Image (cartoon, coloured by chain):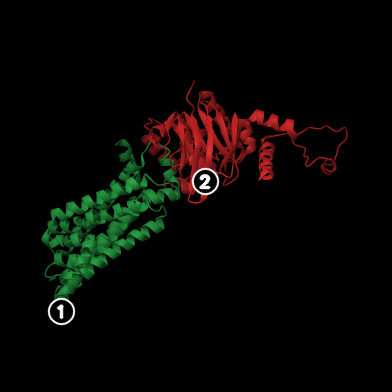
Amino acid sequence: MSVPAIETEGLTKLYGSARGIEDVTFSVEPGEVFGFLGPNGAGKTTTIRALLDLHHPTGGSARLFGLDSRQDSVAIRARLGNLPGDFGFGRQASGREALRLLAKLRGVDGLGRAEALAERFHADLERPLGQLSRGNRQKVGLILATFHEPELLIFDEPTSGLDPLMQEEFLALVAEERARGCTVFVSSHDLDEVQRICDRVGIVKDGRLIAVERVAELLAKTQRRNLVEVEFAEPVELEDVCAMPGVVGAEFAHSNLEQVFLTYYSEEEGEA
Amino acid sequence: MTQVAALVATHLSDRRRSLLAWGLPLGLMSAFIVAIFPSVEDSIGKAVSDYPPALREAFGIGELANVEQYLQAEMLSLIVPLALGYLAVRAAVSGLAGAAESGRLDVLLSAPVSRQRLCAAGFLATAIELAAVLAISYLLTMLGSVLAGVGLAAGSALAGFASVWPLALLFAGLGIVACAWSLRTSVVTGAVAGVLVGMYVADLIGKLDPGFDWLRYASVFKYYGNAIEDGIEPIAFCGVTVAACALAALGAWLFDRRDLSA
């Protein structure tokens, strides 16, 4: 049996009395694309920072490639690529300077793959990063995270700032990385994007993981429960459908992960 | 070692403008002071001889009988050590708190680099930057001496400028310790700059009033003598350098134990 790429057990991070994450337990198998969903402040970035040893857990544990996230942090980071949520590298340095430094730190000879990625994402590696727009900086961040062909990629809101064409290019890149055997852990707000690329998703709310399931199963489960696709012989107004007994909402879209996500959230609110 | 060398090179490249921004003004000012010495020699000598001895000793003024003493009084007793101490704090803090604020720290620590190595590289780069700024200042000062024909002794001036290096480096070490407490550049720089000025004032008070001599033991300035006249005191030079390295090591140890977010 293969060692999980990521495995957390009761991972907890508290900031004094303030909540970070609490009792987060999940695992990500090698070669899997795992989505981490939740609104702002739910605990997605805190979880990622704990995995990367940027924040030290106050409880529980995290293991990557079977190694302890605290004790073996340097060895772990040699095998992964990370795109932080708010990528920056200072104002003066150019993308190429950042790449050269990262290549030296990682012991990578040559920037051939980085050049190819820069061409693919139309990234400007020559201008100082402080002069680039958010989207163009994000492209450089993507290249820095992926140029060394890591075993595990961690993306925190990877497509924020990217235009739709580049978002599509990113999704294609993730598919290629998966085909290469790379594990991908992606935190995102874009539920449509997660639905398209992820094998499984974890939904985090108020610092707690409230669901971890395969995307297809989540969709099927929710559809069985309370989502019915109805075809009318005549065009109807949504207000008329909503007015029917027992109907709480209606829309013209197909069931998607966004609905599942909102369903989980509304259920939790109801239980609270 | 390759990682530290790469980090040091990047740190110095990022701060290349500061080498000139600090080295040129300090060097030109020193060169000016040296160059005007012949024209002010008589008047300033008389004025200073009227100062109370304690005041002269406090500011390291001495007799002002030669250009070396004048350079010590005007530049090396106050302006250069305080300026270099502040530069040291800024340089050391930029590699940690500054990097955290810009997002660079997250990127660097996504690579297989330990936090201790990052701190060591920042400290080493700061040591090199300080040496380079002092070298530029020294060379410009000697140039001013040659052009004005005042005969500043090269060896004495070198000792005077070199003696500032460990003193300034100590504040780089303190800067790294402070980054383990906060990763906000303004907070850390302000706090350590406050310690720098506080130590200077403590030393000054101790010199002015023998009753407060004990205050000087709380200040690194006690170990900063008058190297341009007396030569470098090896024990003080090495001792302060070791203390600076020890502070940097303590800072790295503490930095490894904190959460990283600006």
Q: Is residue A66 left or right of residue B132?
A: right
| Colour of chain A in the rendered structure image | red
Residue shown at 57% from the left, 41% from the top: A208
Q: Position of residue B69 (x, y in %)?
A: 15, 66
B249 relative to B195, above or below: above
Mark 1: few/some/many CA within 10 Å (<14, 14-19, 20+) = few
Numbered mark located on residue A106 in the image: none
Q: Is residue A178 left or right of residue B106?
A: right
A29 relative to A132, above or below: above
* Circle nearer the viewer, 2 or 1: 2
Is disc 1 on the same chain as disc 2?
no
Q: Label 1 sits on what residue type?
A: Asp
What chain is tagged by disc 2?
A: A
3D distance between C-alphas at marks 2 and 1? 66 Å
Which picture quadrant has residue B88?
bottom left
The residue wearing badge 1 is B50
Q: Residue furthest front?
A: A271
Numbered mark located on residue A20 in the image: 2
Q: Quadrant where the N terminus of chain B lies?
A: top left
Q: Secondary structure at mark 1?
A: loop
A196 relative to B203, above or below: above
Q: Position of residue A235 (x, y in %)?
A: 86, 37
Task: Name the foreground residue: A181 vs B227.
Answer: A181
Q: Is residue A232 left or right of residue B3?
A: right
Which picture quadrant has residue B188?
bottom left
